[in-house]
Image (cartoon, rainbow, N blue to C red):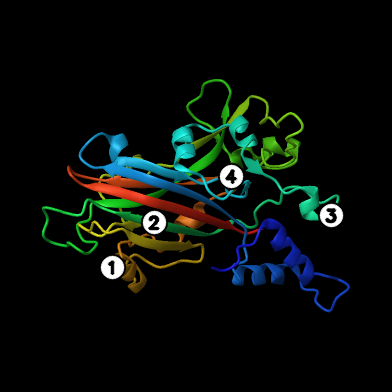
Amino acid sequence: MAYLPSITDVFNVKKVLQNPISRIYLPLEIVDLIIDHASYWPHTTVTAYSLVAVGGGRESASNVLCLRTWPLGAERLDAVKTLEEEQTEKGRWWNWDFWATKLRLTTEADNQVKDEPTWHPPRGTHPCRKIVFELKSHDQGHSGERTGQGTYVHSWTWFDAGIEAATFWPSVHSSQGDTLDELDGKLQSVGHSIPWLSGYDPAKAPFHPPEGYSLQYQPQTAEDGSLHPFLPPETRVQSNVHAQIRTETHNVTWNYTDCFDANSTEADEAAAVGRGKESVDGAFVRRLRTGDCVTLWARARFPAWRNVVEKAKVHVFWAV
């Protein structure tokens, strides 16, 4: 597996390419192009184990939250989140007090420059560069439908990805919150548009959101307002092989540069291996903003159908 750099690694490479006392001194724009071409980006990884979605029953049983990634732009203390952690934390509206104990910020020693900021905001309008899904799963191993067995046709177990957007909500009860972009002006007084990541010192009192607001995360629903589609959408991450009890491993990569139409050859190739034809346009990756979380859902529909998830892992890469 290729080496996966930390934020410090990326900035060390940038310093080498912009060293004024060496023969290599490139403009920052060229350096960023080199970094992107090499896919040399920091990332976070979250893993979940042993989950089952069961069709034909309650909504909570047929739509199972496998995992939730850490906010885009934050490094984790550890690389793996276990099922026990996920079950404890699943379904919470996460606030600052929760995240203050979970985020890792680069230290002064990491930066190797005394006065350098402890947090570097992600770069660009579309900071997320790539999402990699690693899925080990299978269905119930049998089916009353003869058509499509052993393929991805008529498979009613699959995986979807969602976005939980970082939002500041008024402390008083309100039906509508302000997004990070809308709050940007109010946050200038604290120096950054992502204040819960900047300036945090665990030895001191945690930073508090702007007066009158609290940080929460909202799931972004589909265009029809639903959070859980009934049938596999064309934006799905991956379907299971129809009526196969053997565990199958699927590795799916979404890039911010993907731009394939749903009627393209690339979309047909994705559909042939169980992916959604509309998942190859890169829109999901480009829609992510700093602070957003990616969610992975395991789904099953109709009685007797089961989505058995042995392992699910999601890597999120972003540019700095």
Which residue is label 3 attached to? 113
Q: Are marks 2 and 3 in contact (CB under 8 Å)?
A: no
Can residue 223 be spotted in the picture?
no
- Quadrant (top left/top right/bottom left/bottom right) for the N terminus: bottom right
Percent of width and height locating residue 188: 72, 39
Q: CA distance from mark 2 to mark 3?
A: 40 Å
Q: Which residue type does callout 1 highlight?
A: Ala
- Quadrant (top left/top right/bottom left/bottom right) for the C terminus: bottom right
Which residue is label 1 attached to? 272
2 vs 3, front mark: 2
Q: Which residue type does callout 2 highlight?
A: Leu
Q: CA distance from mark 3 to mark 1?
A: 51 Å
Q: Secondary structure at mark 4?
A: loop
Percent of width and height locating residue 212: 64, 24
Q: Secondary structure at mark 3?
A: loop
Of labels 1 and 2, earlier in sequence is: 2
| Few, some or many residues within 10 Å of mark 1 (<14, 14–19, 20+) | some
Of labels 2 and 3, earlier in sequence is: 3
Give the residue displayed 21% in from the left and 47% down from the top.
Answer: 305
Of labels 4 and 3, earlier in sequence is: 3
Give the residue furthest to the right.
Answer: 21
| Few, some or many residues within 10 Å of mark 3 (<14, 14–19, 20+) | few
3 vs 1, front mark: 3
Q: Which residue type does callout 4 highlight?
A: Gly
| Few, some or many residues within 10 Å of mark 4 (<14, 14–19, 20+) | many
Residue 266, placed above or below residue 153: below
Q: Which residue type does callout 3 highlight?
A: Val
Which residue is label 2 attached to? 135
Which numbered dot is residue 291? 4
Which is more toward the observer, 246 or 203? 246
Of labels 4 and 2, earlier in sequence is: 2
Q: CA distance from mark 1 to mark 2?
A: 17 Å
